[in-house]
Amino acid sequence: MMMDPKFNDEIIKKQVAKNAGLTTSEVTEQLKSDALKALSKKGLFVVKTGAQWIEEAKNRPAPRMLFSEFWHEGELCILFADTNVGKSILAVQIGNSIATGNPVHGFTLEADKHKVLYLDFELSDKQFEIRYSVNYKNHYLFCDNFLRAEIDPDTDVPEGKFEEFLHSSLESSIKETGARTLIVDNITYLKNETEKAKDALPLMKQLKALKKKHGISILALAHTPKRDQNKPITRNDLQGSKMLINFCDSSFAIGECQADKGARYLKQIKARNTEFKFDANNVMLCQIAKPDNFLMFQFQYYTTEYDLLINRENSFDDKRVLARQMKEEGATIDQIQDKLGVSRGWVSENTKDITKIKGRNKAKKQNDGPNDSNLTLV
């Protein structure tokens, strides 16, 4: 059991003199905190009682929503989707919302307005301009809290040290701007090969270290490899090692609607600080639109992912994947039969190994085929 550290008067007097403006009691509490931290440090680990962890956590504010349940303050969140689906459009819209303090219609923003640093490695300034203007006129007026950065092509980068120079420049930008939220579009520029496990872990460590050191929230955009749009989105669709998902705090994805190519849906993939609200049974359908001088996602309604994916011409292999996913999400045989246009016997045969355990459907260990590994809920 850790003892309450004691300090003699001489030590306290020295610290009071060193920390001008602090009272004797404040200095004593600071010394106790530092001493307890040193005592709890066990090499790689910090060891404290459960009660101590809770007591310290109570003194920190509860994380507030930045973008509904998808992303909270203090989180490292990954937003992923296929190319040209609208990741950058949504990311700028979220950043602008946080900077102005005005929530995106249909979504919740609990945090106060503050500075957002948007690292844009995708668009040129003219490409950015056309998205937020009417044919290069009548431009949208971003507030001063929204800061955009891109790489200066004239900068002399130390040979062979691009990544180190990039991270150093990023940290300097965070310090100098006072940004509390960082949006990175996209993470392939922070590391050359995010698809390799050996590179994924250091990348996530660097982002988590930035988050912890500066107390910021990070939204990192990432690509998916080419995938079958008729199948549900899973964490396995993120390009690269699953370490990217394992080490982030939260993640959500953008999917395409098969019936309407202009429609997009948002689905939660991972959550730590909140309920899992937007799963396959409750995705948010949006439409990409430009009503004036701002390209944006417009929320339409809630629906199921299956309704957006269903194509009566789908092969039975695709329908089998959807049937198993629906069963694991809790759908009944009758509901699956109705959605997929197949017989009850077919549904029963292809989902019979999925049993109900404590109110949730869970697949038994199986070796049915390569697609089944994408369906297990974690």
Image: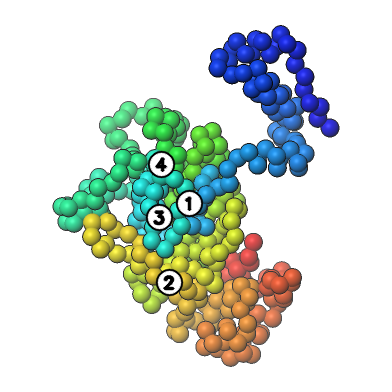
Of label 3 and label 1, which has the lower sequence position? 3
Residue at which label 2 appears:
301
Give percent across and percent down for residue 341: 52, 88
Q: Residue at x 53, y 65 (%)?
A: 278
Q: Which residue is mark 1?
A: 110
C-alpha gap between disc 4 and disc 1: 12 Å
Q: Quadrant of residue 104?
A: bottom left
Q: Which class describes the residues within 10 Å of circle 2: few (<14), some (14-19), or many (20+)?
A: few
Image marks 2 and 4: residues in contact by CB distance under 8 Å? no
Residue beneath the point at 39% across and 29% down: 176
- Image point (70%, 11%), residue name: 11
Q: Identify which amino acid the numbered label 4 is placed on.
A: His
Q: Secondary structure at mark 3?
A: loop
Which comes before the other along the chain, label 2 or label 1?
1
Task: State the residue position of label 4.
Answer: 114
Circle number at residue 285: none
